[in-house]
Image: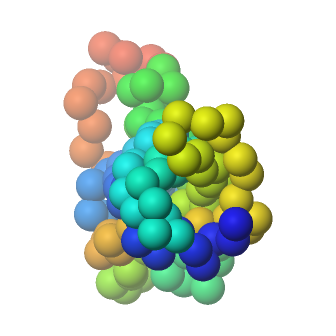
């Protein structure tokens, strides 16, 4: 069984997000993360009822400025990582120019199939599923507004 045989049973569409949401400061890390999880879909495969199990195995961001990054993980928000805002992460990117950017993400899934509850069998190849792009505005800033002052939160961004 090959990926091309799975046309009738597509993988769930992943989603992506970024911090800050929809904007970024040139020269400062912007954080990107995706939501994609293992899941099972049912349908007709080669004329018979079947199940297909999709497991995310790779995430490839196209940051819209000519740079890209591939990761085994979908990343996470700064809060989930227990990091201050504007921290570098395994999926962050620092933009060097101003402008409006379209940031794309393609999630790679491995797939397995089975008929009538039989053993799972591997599908050859990866299923590539793009997300809806994020549009973000990159600009320069001399000052960045944050939730607290450096006196109140010495570990905050820019402190």
Q: Is residue 104 left or right of residue 112?
A: left
Task: From the top left corner, tell me how far across and down residue 111 is, in percent.
Answer: 62, 53
Where does residue 144 sit, x and y in percent of width and height? 32, 50
Write the residue at 35% across / 74% down: 133
Q: Is residue 155 above or below residue 122?
A: above
- Asked if residue 148 lies left or right of residue 86, the reply is left
Residue 149: image quadrant is: top left
Give x and y (percent) for residue 131: 39, 67
* Residue visible at 42% across and 54% down in the picture: 49
Where, by quadrant of the figure, is residue 98 drawn? bottom left
Q: How many marks?
A: 0
User: Taking 144 as reference, is 146 above or below it?
Assistant: above
Can residue 69 be seen at all in this image of the molecule? no
Q: On the rendered image, what quadrant is the N terminus found in?
A: bottom right
Depth check: give the residue in front, 113 or 47: 47
Q: Position of residue 30 (x, y in %)?
A: 47, 55
**Looking at the image, which is closer to me, 139 or 88?**
88
Q: Residue at x 31, y 14 (%)?
A: 152
Instruction: Determine whether, in the image, residue 109 is placed left or right of residue 157.
Output: right
The foreground one among 89 and 159 is 89
Q: Quick check: 47 above or below 76? A: below
Residue drawn 52% across the image and 70% down it: 46
């Amino acid at each position: 069984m090959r990926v091309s045989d799975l046309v009738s049973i597509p993988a769930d569409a992943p989603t992506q997000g970024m911090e800050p949401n929809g904007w970024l400061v040139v020269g400062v890390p912007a954080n990107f993360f995706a939501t994609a999880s293992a899941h099972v879909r049912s349908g007709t495969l080669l004329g018979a009822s079947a199940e297909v199990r999709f497991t995310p195995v790779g995430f490839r961001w196209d940051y819209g400025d000519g740079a890209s990054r591939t990761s085994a993980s979908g990343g996470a928000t700064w809060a989930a990582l227990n990091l201050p805002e504007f921290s570098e992460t395994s999926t962050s990117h620092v933009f060097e120019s101003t402008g409006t950017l379209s940031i794309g993400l393609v999630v790679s899934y491995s797939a397995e199939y089975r008929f009538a509850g039989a053993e799972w069998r591997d599908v050859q190849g990866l299923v590539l599923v793009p997300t809806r792009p994020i549009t973000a505005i990159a600009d320069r800033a001399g000052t960045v507004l944050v939730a607290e002052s450096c006196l109140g939160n010495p570990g905050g961004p820019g402190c």
